[in-house]
Amino acid sequence: MRASLPLALLLLAAAPASAQTPAAPAPAPTPAAAPAAPAPVRVLTLREALQNAQERQPQLRQAQASTAAANARVDQGFSSLLPQVSANAAYQRSFSSGTTFGTTDPTSGIIRREGFNVGLSANQLIWDFGRTTGRWRVSQQTAAAQKDTETQTLGNVLANVQTAYFNALAQQVLVKVAEETLQNQQTHLDQVRAQVQVGTRAEIDLLQQQTLVANAKVQLIQAQGNAAATRAALNQAMGVEGGTDYAVQDEVVDLVQGEQRPPEELVDVALQNRPDLSAAAHQLAAQEQQLSVTRSNFFPSFNVSVAATESGPNPANLQWGVTGQLGLNWSLFQGGLTLAQMREQRANIRNVQAQRDALRQQVRLEVERAQVLVTTSRESVSAADEALRNAEERLRLAEGRYRAGVGNIIELADAQLSATNAAVQRVQAAYNLATARTELARALGQTPLGNGT
């Protein structure tokens, strides 16, 4: 290199003058713009998901609107117990033939009448043997039942959101498992390729490992698609219309209060706390009150009314008058209508009683089944943890044996598959436990919340 340097200088000196003319300096290259850093992925917490559902879920908004309507009907029923006051004003003008009253036109003989009338009247129900008060109490019981239904709807919405959240979280973790599996398979491929090149492994090992890498890519693509689908389902559970370009934060469902107590005790807790059972009780009370209302149709109603009026042809000189009235209204015969209505009400009562009893049995089934699922899922998590540790240790040993030349590609592939399946099983066990605890909380009438809330 040192000997060629003087020769290069001599060649440059012997070059033509034109060639020696220094060329214009090339413009300095513009430095390439640094690639923009990827935008941080938005992270959704369980608390935010539940808050979104309380604010946006259409089912909950519908239940709230129904409760508001039921409360308005209570006020409508109470209004019938208050005085009914009305005012009126009228101007009247008429023409007729004859000579009785009014002003007679001397040329045509037509009588003209005109006058003004203003008045104020009030009507008050005195007593109708509980018919109006009974309707008011029916509306109160119906409103209370609807309020309990709204509470039950809220619990169901939150439980559905929490279940969808943990499903999305499980699929998100499965994506990471698929990524780690692909990376591990790619590392194995590099090792196999190096050993095939030096002749310590057969060509079939390389083909086998390339197939495993391709399968791992397919599994990753499928896991990413499943994760996006579960986030879309989470959006629907929250009542949110938007994209799925977010991640969910890792959360753990807390222990359900009393989840290890005897089943009978948990059933008693559920029977006391479930809003739908309370709604059924209010519905039964409303039907029983409606029967009393219908029975009161056999009896009369009493009311009093007062009216004050001013009338006359000259609005500046009206004559006043006051009228009072005490009235009785009694339907003596309606063709058996009231008796038929009472039979209908008794049938409705039996119907609601049967629905209440069926609901109590359903509650018992939900509690017992959810508790069993919690127990089995908790034990499955422990077993899945042990299986994952064993599979990871098996993979470590298989990798060492393959590098040492005493293992084969089949042994390595089986160990990798076992480790992947164990990781997936561990994720599924954790999701099952979170779902089981969510269902147990819902069955007990408790608000399902994770530790992030």
Image: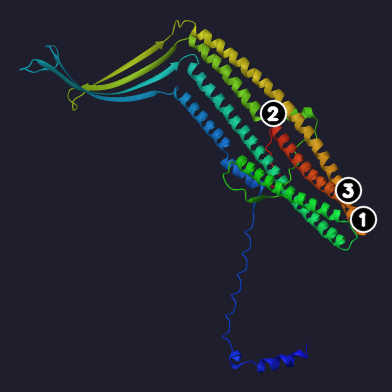
Q: Residues within 10 Å of mark 3 (few under 14, many from 20)?
A: some
Going 56% across and 41% down the picture, which residue do you hit?
56
Assign a secondary structure to mark 2.
Answer: helix
Disc 2 marks which residue? 272
x%, y% of residue 297?
48, 11
Left or right of 243? Residue 367 is right
Residue 82: quarter of image: top left
Disc 1 marks a residue whose amino acid type is: Arg
Left or right of 25? Residue 73 is left
Q: Which residue ends up furthest to the right in the rendered image?
A: 406
Left or right of 97? Residue 359 is right
Going 58% across and 91% down the picture, which residue do you hit?
18
Q: Residues within 10 Å of mark 1 (few under 14, many from 20)?
A: some
Disc 2 marks a residue whose amino acid type is: Gln
Of residues 139 and 39, the one drawn nearer to the viewer in this rendering: 39
Disc 3 marks which residue? 390
The residues bearing labels 3 and 2 have C-alpha atoms spaced at a distance of 46 Å
Left or right of 94? Residue 270 is right
Going 45% across and 10% down the picture, which residue do you hit?
300
Of residues 346 and 196, the one drawn nearer to the viewer in this rendering: 196
Q: Which mark is residue 81?
A: none
Disc 3 marks a residue whose amino acid type is: Asn
Disc 1 marks which residue? 401
Numbered disc in front, either 1 or 3:
1
Q: Cβ–Cβ below 8 Å for labels 1 and 3?
A: no
Going 85% across and 53% down the picture, which residue do you hit?
204
Assign a secondary structure to mark 3.
Answer: helix
Would residue 451 be visible to someone looking at this image? no
Numbered disc in front, either 3 or 2:
3
Would residue 362 be visible to someone looking at this image? yes
